[in-house]
Image (cartoon, helix red, strand yellow):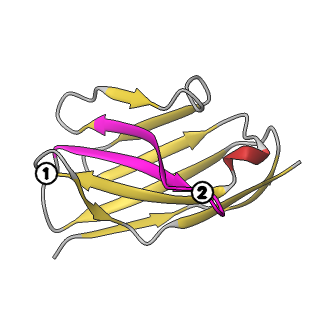
């Protein structure tokens, strides 16, 4: 059974940093990523990392501020620096095995106050 469990959300002030973690279990994935959904908006892509090669890709809105990484224990991280109020959203960990985001965590709330 596949499980993705996020942790690390909370309330911070603009300009602060925060790190989200995602623990994956149950299967081997080719790619893992993070999406987010703000109130009243559609879920949007944030970042992704290829599990073997470690190649990364980012949304323009977070490039230069967020860093996605992984370790050998099936953990994926999202380091978020210089946070802005517009980064406020529920952040979801997600994973692929064959080209589509088939697996999702339950989400963790990130709130950035101005």
CB within 8 Å, label 2 to label 1? no
Given residues 59 and 26, the one toward you in this image is 59
Toward the top, the furthest residue is 64
Q: Is residue 52 above or below residue 32?
A: above
Residue marked by disc 1 = 97
The verdict on residue 69 being magenta is no
Left or right for 93, reference 7: left
User: For residue 70, what is the image quadrant?
Assistant: top left
SS of the residue at dot 2? loop
SS of the residue at dot 1? loop
Image quadrant for the N terminus? Answer: bottom left
Q: Main secondary structure of the magenta part?
A: strand
At x 49%, y 67%, the residue is: 107
Q: Is residue 54 above or below residue 99?
A: above
At x 43%, y 72%, the residue is: 106
How packed mark 1 is, by other alpha carbons closer than 10 Å (few <14, some 14-19, many 20 or more), is some
Q: Mark 2 against mark 1, which lies toward the viewer? A: 2
Q: Position of residue 82 (x, y in %)?
A: 73, 34
At x 36%, y 38%, the residue is: 48
User: For residue 45, what is the image quadrant?
Assistant: top left
At x 49%, y 55%, the residue is: 43
Q: Position of residue 34 (x, y in %)?
A: 43, 49
Residue marked by disc 2 = 41
Q: CA distance from mark 2 to mark 1?
A: 27 Å
Q: Is residue 41 above or below residue 99?
A: below
Mark 2 and mark 1 lie on one chain; the one further toward the N terminus is 2
The span shown in magenta is 30-49
Q: Position of residue 52 (x, y in %)?
A: 17, 34
């Amino acid at each position: 059974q596949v499980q993705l469990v996020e942790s690390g959300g909370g309330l911070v002030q603009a300009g602060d940093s925060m790190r989200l973690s995602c623990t994956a279990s149950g299967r081997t994935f080719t790619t893992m990523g993070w999406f987010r959904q703000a109130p009243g908006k559609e879920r949007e892509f944030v970042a992704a990392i290829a599990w073997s090669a470690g190649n990364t890709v980012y949304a323009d809105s977070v490039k230069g501020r967020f860093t996605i990484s992984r370790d050998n224990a099936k953990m994926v991280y999202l380091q978020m620096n210089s946070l802005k109020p517009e980064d406020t959203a529920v952040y979801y960990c997600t994973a692929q095995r064959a080209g589509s985001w088939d697996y999702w965590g339950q989400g963790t709330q990130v709130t950035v106050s101005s």
